Each structure stands twice: as C-alpha cells, then as structure tokens.
Image (cartoon, helix red, strand yellow):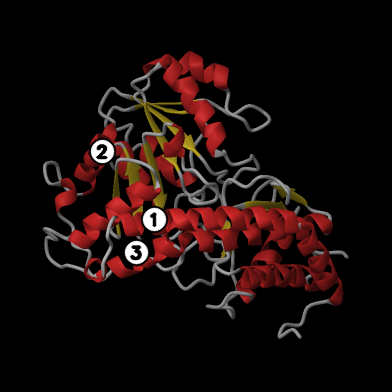
Amino acid sequence: MSFFEIDSRILEVAEKAEKMCEKRFREIERIGEYNGQKVLYSFISNNVSEMHLKGTTGYGYNDDGRDKLDKVYADAFGCEDALVRHSFVNGTHALSTALFGVLRPGDTLLCVTGAPYDTLTEVITGEYGGSLKEFGVKYEKIDLLPDGNADIEEIKKRAGDCKVAYIQRSRGYSLRESFSVDKIGEIIKAVKEVNDKAIIMVDNCYGEFVEEREPTAVGADLIIGSLIKNPGGAIAKTGGYIAGRRDLVELCSYRLTTVGIGKEVGCSLDENREMYLGFFLAPQTVEAAVKTSVFACAFYSLLGYEVFPSYDAHRTDIIAALKLGNEEALCAFCRGIQNGSPVDSMATPEPWEMPGYDSKVIMAAGAFTMGASIELSADAPLREPYAVWLQGGITYPSGKMGIMLAAEAMLKSGQLKI
C-alpha cells in the first residue's frame, strides 16, 4: 500500500536499488550503534541529570547545564574541551569565531584542501567589514590534485610557516570525495612533519558520526560544526560547536563573548534540553541520513545518472551529489524533494540570489527547523556541472520517499526517461 502516486517503473527501480544497498546499510547501522554507545557513555560518565536540561537567563553565571554539555561533547569527540552554544547562528559563524580566535595580524592561514565554502570566502579575503585580510592575516591555499586528493608533497613544501592549516572535510559545491578521518590524518601528518606548531583546524560540517572516529582522533587541534546539521540530531533549533585543545577553545570563547570572560558567561535560555536530546539522538539520525544518501546514489545510478560518491563507497559525510545535466532537471528534482517534505510540501522552490554565493541557487528544504540540512534537503547552484547536492533524512522511510518523489517530478516534467 502506498499513499503516494508514483509511477510503477520508479517503484521497480527503487526496489532494485534498495537490494543493492543491503550490505552497505548493515555497515552504516553498525557504525550508528557504535556511535550511539559512545554518546550514551559520555552522558553517563558526566552524570547528566534533569537539572542540566533547564536553562538560565541574564549573564548565565554558573550555568551548569551549559558547562556540562561542553564536557559531553568533548568526551564524545575525544578531546579536551568544547564550546557548544545556541548563540552560534550557523556553521560559518562558528568557523569564523575559531579563525578570529586563534589567528593574529601577520599570521598565515593555509587552506590545504583548496578554497573553502563560498560563505567563508568573505570572512577570509573580503575587502570590507573586518575580514581576516583587513586585520592583516595572510591567506594561501593549496589546490587539490585532479583526483580530488590533497597534494601532500605541496603541503610539505608550503606548510612550514603557517599558523593555521585548515581542512574542509566535506565536498562543498564540488564533485570530489569528502575526506575520511584516515585521509585527514595523512594531511595532518604532512603538516606536522614540517611545522609541529601549526594549528590544525577542521571544518567538520556534515561529517560528525558518519565514521567511528572524529578528526580529533588523528591530531586535529580544533573541529567545528553546526547543530542544525549532524550533531543537533534534528532537535536543536540553532547553534554550533568548537571542540579540541583546551587552550584554543578558550581563545575561541574570548572571540565569541569577550576577552577575559569567555566561557563563563552566556545564558542557555530554554535551549539546553533540545541540545542535549539532539546530541543523544544524533548517531541514529545520522545513520538515517547516510542510508538515505546511499539509497539515492544507487537509485539515480540505475536511472542512468552520474552520482558522487557511488552507492557502495565508504561514506565520510551525509552528502551526495547527483549530476542531472541541466537547469530544468535541477529545478524539477528540487520541486519533488519539497513535495515530499513534512513541512511546506505545498511550496514551490525557485532559484534566487542567495547571500554568500556567486550564482543563483535553488533549494528544497521543507524542514521542522529552517535550513536544517540534517533534514532531507537539496540545493543546486544553477551553473555547470548542473549537479544537485542532497543531504539529510531524519528517518530512512521518509528520506526514501522524498527521493522517489523527486524522480516522479522529473518524470512528469519530461526531464527523466525510463
């Protein structure tokens, strides 16, 4: 029985795709169980109690719930300290806070995995508004090799003088593979070989709990992410985190609040319960998102499209890129994803000039939390190679249905041939 009108040919392809994914699904479930136990242990070992779920107002002095959540994150991520706050407005804000926290005039920021996300470019090299460039921080980048891997030899040549070596784990709007924790470890080893004082900073967005380890396990000094992506578990309404070395987290806290006060202030209002609950649910929520992504890649590869990564590849983030070929196909796909959303399913996404991007972008995101990319969502810049980037899915059944409805929308618009 189905509540949705979907062409029988699409249903047949979906059934075949799901069978193809069975082996990969079992591995994803194993990782989800491992990470779920890790997070549970962190809660138990830190004696989280009902009182920690309550919030504070005003200055937030002695907010034990806020401080305990930092410890839970730090232990789960295997590091010394963390700064977890609802006052981070997005991942870019958390990344910007970390960069301004540890860099000083005359220092060099070296991006060793090519250019960072579009939204962070203005923070680093902007000509106004107080960018790192305006404050005298030098910026260099090392492009990736043609195969999408880091250029280890070039890193060894150029990392000797940098203050921060910056790694972007996820693919952004590119078709390269995201970096596994093992590959991040290789990059860190290359940097430390020539500069043992370099601060290794990893943009960990979309990668939390996809593997058994986080980049802190292989030498990252700081990892940064957004709570409306993986670690918020689709429950946290806003926020971000910075985790890693205690001294560096403290410097970042000075930039978030004020020098000398740092983590000691910042009321939690009524956000603690949702941030705790979201983090507790995150490993299983991420499991559902990764299974949705794997299914999408198997399904669209059977329909004849090029997908990144392949359905049977080892996953290192929740994102899949589907190369659909033209603007009309991108728009039809996004309409279908929107139609399959639990919220705002009746809306019709349209391309628009999104702040921080250099081309029009179409986004489908019918989510309980606005912009939460742990929920099933898709976005595509209207430019070559006309690919859509798909992420999220807080339950596998709803994620699977969204993928099929996207194909149905493409079929009805004449953009899909079966």
Residue labelled with disc 3: 276
- Whether residue 297 sits left or right of residue 48 in the image: it is right
Label 1: element kind: helix
Label 2: element kind: helix
Which residue occupies the foreground of this view, 174 or 234?
Answer: 234
> Is label 3 or label 1 in front?
1
| Number of marks | 3
Answer above or below: position of 190 versus 63. Answer: above
Q: Give the CA distance from mark 3 to mark 1.
A: 14 Å
Q: Position of residue 194 (x, y in %)?
A: 43, 14
Q: Report the residue at 78% width, 71% height from top.
A: 413
* Label 2: few (<14), some (14–19) or many (≥20) C-alpha neighbours in 10 Å: some
Q: Which label was assigned to residue 182?
A: none
Residue labelled with disc 2: 246
- Whether residue 44 sits left or right of residue 293 in the image: it is left
Is the Cβ of the residue at disc 2 closer than 8 Å to that at disc 3?
A: no
* Kind of residue at badge 2: Arg
Hey, which quadrant is residue 277 in on the image?
bottom left
Answer above or below: position of 341 versus 243. Answer: below
Label whose residue precedes the other's in the sequence (3 or 1): 1
Q: Position of residue 268 (x, y in %)?
A: 22, 64
Answer above or below: position of 98 versus 139. Answer: below
Label whose residue precedes the other's in the sequence (1 or 2): 1
Residue labelled with disc 1: 41
